[in-house]
Amino acid sequence: MNAKTEDMIDRYLEAVAAQLSPEEREDITAELKDLILSRVEAKEEALGQALSDDEREAILKEIGHPLVVAARYRKGPDSLIGPELFPYWLYGAKAGLLILGAVFALGLVIRLLGGSGHFGQDFGQEIAQAFHGFFGAALTLIGALTLGGAVMEHYGIRPKWLTDWRVKDLGAFGLSDPLTWGVAAKSAGERVQAQSASGRATSAARRPRGRSITGDAIFSALATGLFILWWVGLVNFPGLGFIRVEGELVTVSAAPIWAALFVPVLLYALGQLGIDLFTLIRPGAVRLRAVLSVLSAVAGLWLAWTIFGAGHWFTLSVGTEQARIAGDWVLLDFDRMRTLGDGPRDLVGVASTLSVVMTWVLAFTGLNLLWKIAANAGRSFLPQA
Amino acid sequence: MTIDADLFESMRLELRRGSLVLAVLACLRTERYGYTLRQALAADGLEMEESTLYPLLRRLESQGLLISEWREEEKRKKRFYVLSPGGVSMLERLADEWRGINVSLDKML
């Protein structure tokens, strides 16, 4: 054995050692060195002469690339997302991409229809903008899914909904096939109708048979997750800040209340996402989920009240001309609802219409949250399933 | 009917993979170090890459099925492996399982 051989082997072993944890580095490389030297000696004995550089290197190549050799010693998973989690990752990616595609396609159609005056001129630009936004959002979604999957793989996290699933909870998995979206909605509607027709008692505390708690939670988690990504600026929906009024591009800018409520809205969305994930992990924890939902709804009600109370929500602007989307209790008038859209289609007219719409949306949101509080407060007193 | 060579190789490796642990445990009823273990396996018709064998030895040792010891032999320190008492029991149970599978498969084949 000459110094040249030792040098080549040492360089190989250094490359392996660099990939190993410090506590086992010395032990593993000592054993590998013995293996390599044994192989070299056996070959030299068989040939009756010292090996050439190429022959020595051939032995090292047979043993394997340092990264591969070191990886075999690694404890924990061999892959970022293993075969057990991969189908779930694939489902999440497919369903998420399809939902994103649908959202962007819908946004594109609305913008193209809204911009009738410049349809031909803006068509290419709008499509390019939609594609750009879609690919950015898609990459973020896949990155977030991969990160989540890798964490679950690394720490061996297997939520209950992965291992303890029930057939009635499988409805949401149709989301990965857009052809079944309508069918699923129709069958859900038919189930609810059939229940009403049969006069079966459906208390607020009992979920109609056929509706899937985990299916709803998966859908809600995906939607809330997308909202959070958009809210913190990781996903961009191009065109969201613009509308067309009489062929002119109008900038929609947020009123100061949204900046003031940035953190509360983010916390509210994260809380909702937490409740969805909790539902997926512990679908049977009805009372605790109800208590969390009450807390979330109270927070939502406070947000809706604060936003409503601010009175100014958006500003529409074209050049120096501006119109505010704003409202108060006066706009909660059924006569205004009846004449909605009858006003002028100029900037001020559109802002007035949107002001009425926004006022009613906030009012309905508040009522919905009140109902949610009442329903979940009742559910929280039910005996645990 | 021609068989896809790549597909055959992939299925052959998959078939062999499960039997390698049993072969290594069986060979280590006698104390050996890595290089001689690999030679012994090859002599009995089970070639095994070093990059698979050595990590496998460490895993089996961490699972309490093997005992290892560094000793000097032929002017070099070598790590010798042998079955632990737990490894002996495990080998017996796995060997019974293997024979059962063989009997079942023989009937089918």
Image (cartoon, rainbow, N blue to C red):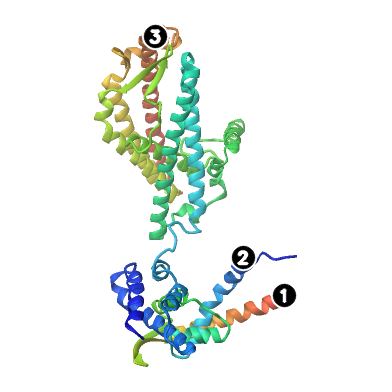
Q: CA distance from mark 3 to mark 1?
A: 83 Å
Residue A282 at least partly seen: no
Counting residues from the start of the chain, the first of labels 1 and 2 encountered is 2
Going by the numbered disc 1, the residue's amino acid type is Leu
Q: Which residue is mark 1?
A: B109
Going by the numbered disc 3, the residue's amino acid type is Asp
- The total number of labels drawn is 3
Foreground: B89 or A114?
A: A114
Quarter of the figure with the N terminus of chain A? bottom left
Check chain identity for marks 1 and 2: say if they share one: yes
The image shows residue A280, relative to residue B22, as above or below, that is above
Disc 3 or disc 2, which is closer to the eye?
2
Residue A131 at least partly seen: yes
Q: Position of residue B40 (x, y in %)?
A: 51, 87
Disc 1 or disc 2, which is closer to the eye?
2
Location of residue A200 (image quadrant): top right
Which chain's residue wears label 2? B
Q: Which mark is residue A346?
A: 3
Going by the numbered disc 2, the residue's amino acid type is Asp
What is the secondary structure assignment of the residue under circle 2?
A: helix
Give the crowd class for mark 1: few <14, some 14-19, many >=20 residues within 10 Å: few
Instruction: Please report contact status of discs 3 and 1: CB closer than 8 Å, yes or no.
Output: no
Q: CA distance from mark 1 to mark 2?
A: 23 Å
Q: Position of residue A88 (x, y in %)?
A: 50, 51
Q: Position of residue A257 (x, y in %)?
A: 26, 25
User: In the displayed image of the protein, which residue is found farthest to the right?
Assistant: B1
What is the secondary structure assignment of the residue under circle 3?
A: loop
Q: CA distance from mark 3 to mark 2?
A: 69 Å
Foreground: A62 or A206?
A: A62
Give the crowd class for mark 3: few <14, some 14-19, many >=20 residues within 10 Å: few
Q: Which mark is residue B6?
A: 2
